[in-house]
């Protein structure tokens, strides 16, 4: 509150009181002195404005400097986004390593990459089926079989006759004929041949002649005439049923000298010719259409089962007999 006393001509003075929001007059004897009072009030307001302007003039340069100083403090500084991103992208400097540490790290990297290389090599190498042996069970000749994946040139007539001769005069041929003759004599297949040693001999020489005659007609004579390859080309892998059907069907399908599959005329006609010749030296009771048909069907079925056994024997030999040997 501001009080201002104004002198007047009378005995009583005039007082002007300023308070926030309003002002009032006190001890006013008349309105005659109102003009001097207003002049004094205006003068006081002008002095107050001049003082306030001077304070603002002198304090204005100081306030921006103080605010700039507060913004420049390290704990209150916020880096711009570009600077923060640049600092995040800069990697830390690598720590220095000794020669021994570097050699050990190189060795670990080479060892970790070696199994990957070996895995790639093993995956690139395709599994190879086991090869066809020259003999099955160490007794049965297997000269006609060709291992899976092998493509030999077409056999010459000399090679075809060699295969027929090896199959006919191998020691296993005599063992096979002896077993089948013993069974035929025991079951009295041809009663006209009799029983005992005489009957066994009658079965033996006829059985051996059947085998030899059939080998030359099927393996040598007919293939040379029809230019067919009578060797058995093993499939070696795949589903069991598929391989069995393939092996049995080779009685009707065989490649020619150009490598194309064709009708197996050598097997079908060769077996027919051999069985027709056999009718001349067997008893008269078998010299019938029924006797010829049954004997022909037996010969073709036996060859089909032999091919199936050829197909699966390498797998049986590798997974059964070799495993037993390793366990022993």
Image (spheres, rainbow, N blue to C red):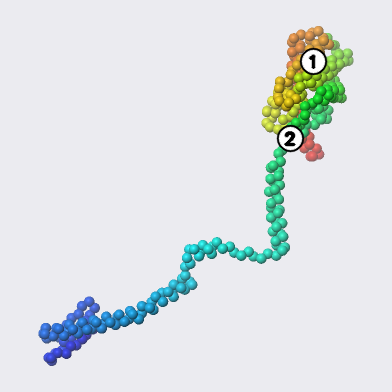
In x, y percent, where is residue 308?
A: 74, 26
Residue at the location (71% across, 53% down)? 111
Residue 315 or 275: which is nearer the viewer?
Answer: 275
Look at mark 1 in the image and give the residue it sits on. 274
Residue at the location (85% across, 20% down)? 178
Query: In the picture provided, is 239 more to the left or to the right than 295?
Result: left
Look at mark 2 in the image and give the residue it sits on. 129
The quadrant in which residue 279 appears is top right
**At numbered mark 1, what does the secondary structure look like: helix, strand or loop?**
helix
Q: Is residue 320 above or below residue 264?
A: below
Residue 1 can be seen in this image: no
Q: Indicate which disc, 2 or 1, sits on the residue closer to the N terminus.
A: 2
Q: Which residue is the extreme one toward the front?
A: 258
In x, y percent, where is residue 120?
A: 69, 45
Residue at the location (75% across, 31% down)? 151
Residue 128 can be seen in this image: yes
Q: Badge 2, how many Cα within 10 Å: few under 14, some, many 20+? A: some
């Amino acid at each position: 509150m501001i009080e201002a006393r104004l002198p007047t001509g009378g005995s009583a003075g005039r007082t002007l009181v300023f308070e926030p929001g309003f002002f009032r007059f006190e001890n006013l004897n008349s309105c005659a002195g109102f003009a001097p009072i207003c002049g004094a009030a205006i003068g006081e307001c002008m002095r107050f404005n001049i003082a306030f302007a001077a304070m603002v003039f002198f304090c204005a340069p100081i306030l921006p400097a103080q605010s700039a100083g507060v913004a420049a403090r390290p704990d209150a500084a916020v880096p711009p986004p570009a600077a923060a991103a640049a600092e995040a992208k800069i990697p830390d400097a690598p720590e220095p390593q000794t020669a021994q540490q570097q050699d050990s790290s190189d060795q670990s990297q080479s060892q970790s990459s070696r199994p990957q290389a070996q895995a790639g090599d093993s995956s690139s190498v395709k599994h190879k089926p086991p090869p066809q042996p020259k003999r099955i069970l160490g007794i049965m000749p297997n000269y006609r079989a060709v291992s899976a994946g092998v493509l030999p040139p077409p056999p010459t007539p000399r090679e075809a006759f060699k295969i027929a001769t090896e199959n006919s005069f191998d020691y296993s041929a005599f063992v096979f004929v002896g077993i089948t003759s013993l069974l035929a004599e025991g079951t009295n297949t041809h009663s006209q041949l009799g029983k005992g040693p005489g009957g066994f001999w009658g079965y033996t020489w006829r059985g051996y002649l059947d085998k030899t005659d059939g080998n030359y007609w099927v393996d040598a004579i007919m293939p040379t005439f029809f230019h067919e390859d009578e060797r058995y080309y093993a499939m070696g892998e795949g589903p069991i049923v598929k391989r069995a059907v393939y092996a049995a069907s080779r009685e009707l399908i065989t490649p020619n000298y150009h490598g194309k599959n064709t009708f197996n005329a050598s097997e079908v006609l060769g077996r027919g010719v051999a069985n027709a010749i056999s009718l001349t030296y067997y008893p008269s009771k078998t010299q019938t259409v029924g006797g010829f048909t049954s004997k022909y069907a037996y010969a073709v079925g036996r060859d089909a089962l032999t091919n199936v056994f050829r197909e699966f024997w390498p797998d049986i030999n590798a997974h059964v007999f070799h495993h037993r040997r390793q366990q022993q």
